[in-house]
Amino acid sequence: MKKAVSLAILALVSILSITTVSFSTYAYNEENQLENNVKLLLNEEQFSDEEFYYELSKLSKDDIIQLGNIVSIDNNSDTNNLMPLATALAVNETKFTEDDIVSLIEDTTNNIEFRNVLVQFYAYKVDTEKNYNEEFKKMLLDNSVDDSIKISIVSTFKFNDKEDNEILKELVMDENIELSNIALKRLKNIDENTAKQISFQILDNYENEDSERVKNALNVYSALYDDEDTINMLSEEDSFQDFCITLLNDSNYSETAAFALGNLYDYEAVKSVITSDVDFLTKVCVIDQNYSILLDKLYDDINENDFNIILDAMEILPINEFYDPIKEIVVSDTIENNMIKEKGNKILEVIQSVGVSANEKWND
């Protein structure tokens, strides 16, 4: 929902240059201005865009704050209500200073969803490429601040300096799993070694950790992994790949482990996913991501077992670029097993019929 609100705000940059129009189709009841404002905000479809923006532009700062607390019911807000609220903020952006917005976010008498929208509004006003307000740093370290506000801040702004690094490291240890996971992802972008070390610690103790924290650590660690890394699992030193293969058999982690193995770009890792019991779509994604690994294997003194596994992969996701090498192997003396050759011929027919082009984005 926060993402939708953020996109709504960012998509409305152009409305700030709207010229004033000399009409109003909205009939106000002067005796109940608040009720009229609520009706305005929640009945956008009754107006043209130009009319709606014009009516919103007549709202005062106090009007918008009052509306924000009414249409954003704590923890139960409808995104459809929040989006016109985001529009109202964007139209009236010049009526709010940066300090105004921060004060409203800090004010716990405001509804929590409204305060989260205001975090997005602040980012819209100042540009997320810039350093976020120092007051936000204090909020992140304040135990009295609602976790959802912290999640909005960490999700929205970029973190760059050493002080940010220390804040994120502390947030990674937070009991709120969503906040912890987002902080670790952010940390990965500015301090890979620390993010890898923290992920390692989580995985090393995975049986005693929250499953969502473990999944996030798998994703982060696999994205930063290199061949020299090892992980201590069950008092035995295994490769990270072996660790993930073990988790393939754990229903709590099988899908995440499969994607982590896909991130390793290694034939044995991909092979373990193809031959596992993970769901079909997960296999499709891993094969798509690692098609070049499988294709290279066809040209590398392929044996019958590996050829059969690659044929299995092509049953799952037929890729056009595999047609010629498979055909060449099928007609050669490399494969003696007639059943595998027959399977290869059937796969060739499948590729001709429904094959797709390799996804080149994975080579970027």
Image (cartoon, helix red, strand yellow):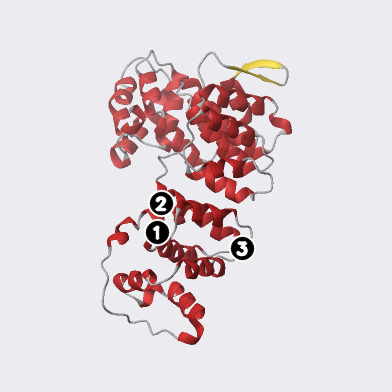
Question: Camera-side residue: 230 or 261?
Answer: 230
Along the line of sight, the residue nearer the viewer: 337 or 152: 152
Q: Position of residue 236 (x, y in %)?
A: 70, 16
Disc on the earlier residue, 2 or 3: 3
Q: How many marks?
A: 3
Left or right placement of residue 175 versus residue 299 in this view: right
The secondary structure type at the circle numbered 2 is: helix
In the picture shown, does residue 329 fall above or below 361? above
Q: Where is residue 224 shown, x and y percent of the image?
A: 50, 24
Identify which residue is drawn at 42% across, 65% down. Answer: 88
Q: Is residue 202 left or right of residue 334?
A: right
Kind of residue at disc 2: Lys
Task: Using a 10 Å C-alpha cutoff, classify the residue at mark 2 as few (fewer than 14 neighbours), some (14 to 19) or many (20 or more).
Answer: many
At 43% from the left and 76% from the top, the residue drawn is: 40
Whole-number angstrom distance, CA of label 2 to CA of label 3: 24 Å
Mark number, residue 74: 3
Camera-near label (3 vs 1) is 1
Question: N-terminal of the two: label 2 or label 1?
Answer: 1
Three-letter amino acid code of the residue under disc 1: Glu
Q: Disc 3 vs disc 1: Cβ atoms closer than 8 Å?
A: no
Instruction: Report the amino acid beneath label 3.
Output: Asp
Mark 2 vs mark 3: give the one in front.
2
Which element type, helix, strand or loop, lies under badge 1? helix
Q: Which residue is mark 1?
A: 93
Q: Of 67 and 330, which appears nearest the observer?
A: 67
Relative to 343, 257 lies left or right: right
CA distance for labels 2 and 1: 7 Å
The local crowd at label 1, few if under 14, some if 14 to 19, many if 20 or more residues have their Cα within 10 Å, is some
Identify the image quadrant of the C terminus: top left
Q: Which mark is residue 125?
A: 2
